[in-house]
Image (cartoon, helix red, strand yellow):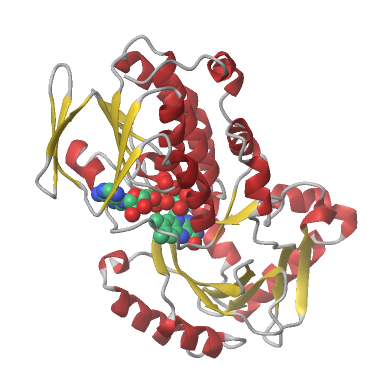
Amino acid sequence: MSRCILITGASVAGNTAAWWLGHYGFDVTVVERTSEFRDGGQNIDIRGVGRDVLRRMGLQQTALDHGTGEEGTVWIDEQGGEVAKFVTVELGRDGPTAEMEILRGDLARLLYEPARNRATFRFGDRVDGIEEGADAVSVTFASGQIEQYDAVVVAEGVGSSTRELVFPQENDPRWMDLTIAYFTIPRQADDNRMWRWYNATDGRSISLRPDTHGTTRAMLSLQQPPNGEQEWTVEQQKAYMHQRFTDAGWQAHRVLAAMEKTEDFYFDVLRQVRMKRWSKERVVLTGDAAWCATPLAGIGATLAVTGGYVLASELQRGSDIGQALSAYEGAMRPMVEKGQGVPKIAPRMMNPHSRLGINLLHTVLNIASKPVIRGVANKLFASEPDGPDLSRYDELLVKIPSVC
Ligand SMILES: Cc1cc2nc3c(=O)[nH]c(=O)nc-3n(C[C@H](O)[C@H](O)[C@H](O)COP(=O)(O)OP(=O)(O)OC[C@H]3O[C@@H](n4cnc5c(N)ncnc54)[C@H](O)[C@@H]3O)c2cc1C
């Protein structure tokens, strides 16, 4: 197996793949389009098999130590009164808040720091052209450099441009009719350790979540069909959210005022990436670039770390690239398809449009939160995902070859 690999995208999937490929002795270059490492982002969680991957990297405890400290989820009314409350330790397993809740930027950095010792990272560049040859891939970068690699791993997230370059029009996105703006706001005295979720009419919701950086993470959600908002400038996106949320009630004014000044604004018109194949000759997709399931599935980061690990391990095990990439796809497809099965009605149920719908949602959540029927509550939320059998890679944990 040839061993010089390019990874594009230095976030959760790319850094995991870099860590493992470097660990196995591959010669790895990571190219990230932003000029420096991106720290931003909000709460994401790692469940089941994803935690096993972190354990294999010796990072599980560190990730838990970097947790957001979120203790559970509470739905509240306009006055801030509690409507339904789910405390993670009382659920006995992962609920809407998982045991391992971590900020996206903290997780990506946790993976990036050790990966830097195993791979060469280059910031402020991206792939401009790609040409597959019989024995190598020739990559032209925006910087003008041209380099040869044995394989290219595309880990560029949901809007990946290299995916479009190599697999034009093959993505058949599934739009989830939900738009979310995520950003960090100053903490105020009554912000607590719970994820507070407030529903307003017209499919709007405001969430406030704790972190351990002395700030609060805000989320504005709009349940509606997409209208190209992902292509707008940040200024347009902020102005739109302002206009839509100004009369939403509860802490809308505080959140909107802080949105104007925030430095990390991430805007997502939720869509799943649906690809019939994840590789073409020597180019392979992983993480959201391959299969984005959207935050609604609750397993995006779990899939990203698992995919990065499985891909690296199959490349290490395989006798040739084609066989390795097809084993990777075979191992990941069932988990991805299950994760993408989240019903399109889910955003509408959780973000009702009418006052009557909000009252109904609150009643259901209130009943589900009662101790006597917590089993139902556990089923309502994403929990332990099934995943590939990682024991097939156990033999690789001790066999580390030398660098190419
Ligand atoms: C800044 C940021 C904030 C986020 N915030 C949240 C959040 O609050 N909640 C949530 O649920 N999910 C969030 N996500 C998405 C979440 O990280 C992913 O769903 C999940 O972790 C899968 O990660 P990934 O590595 O596959 O993709 P991503 O985390 O999306 O990372 C893709 C990486 O590739 C880089 N990239 C993109 N195009 C190119 C290119 N052409 N060349 C080189 N590099 C490229 C991006 O800059 C990014 O670093 C965020 C992602 C980012 C980048």
In x, y percent, where is residue 393? Answer: 55, 18
Q: Residue at x 64, y 77 (%)?
A: 356
Tell me which corner region of the image, top left, top right, bottom left or bottom right, holds residue 352. bottom right
Q: Residue at x 74, y 64 (%)?
A: 364
Q: Does residue 36 appear in this view? A: yes
In x, y percent, where is residue 331? Answer: 49, 23
Does residue 348 lie above or below 317 as drawn?
below
Q: Residue at x 71, y 69 (%)?
A: 194
Q: Residue furthest top?
A: 319
In x, y percent, where is residue 371? Answer: 88, 57
Q: Answer left or right for 160 relative to 56.
A: left
Front residue of 250/50: it is 50
Q: Residue at x 21, y 50 (%)?
A: 125
Front residue of 389/29: it is 29
Quarter of the image containing the N terminus? top left
In x, y percent, where is residue 290? Answer: 36, 39
Q: Does residue 248 appear in this view? A: no
Quarter of the image containing the C terminus? top left
Does residue 120 lie above or below 138 as drawn?
below
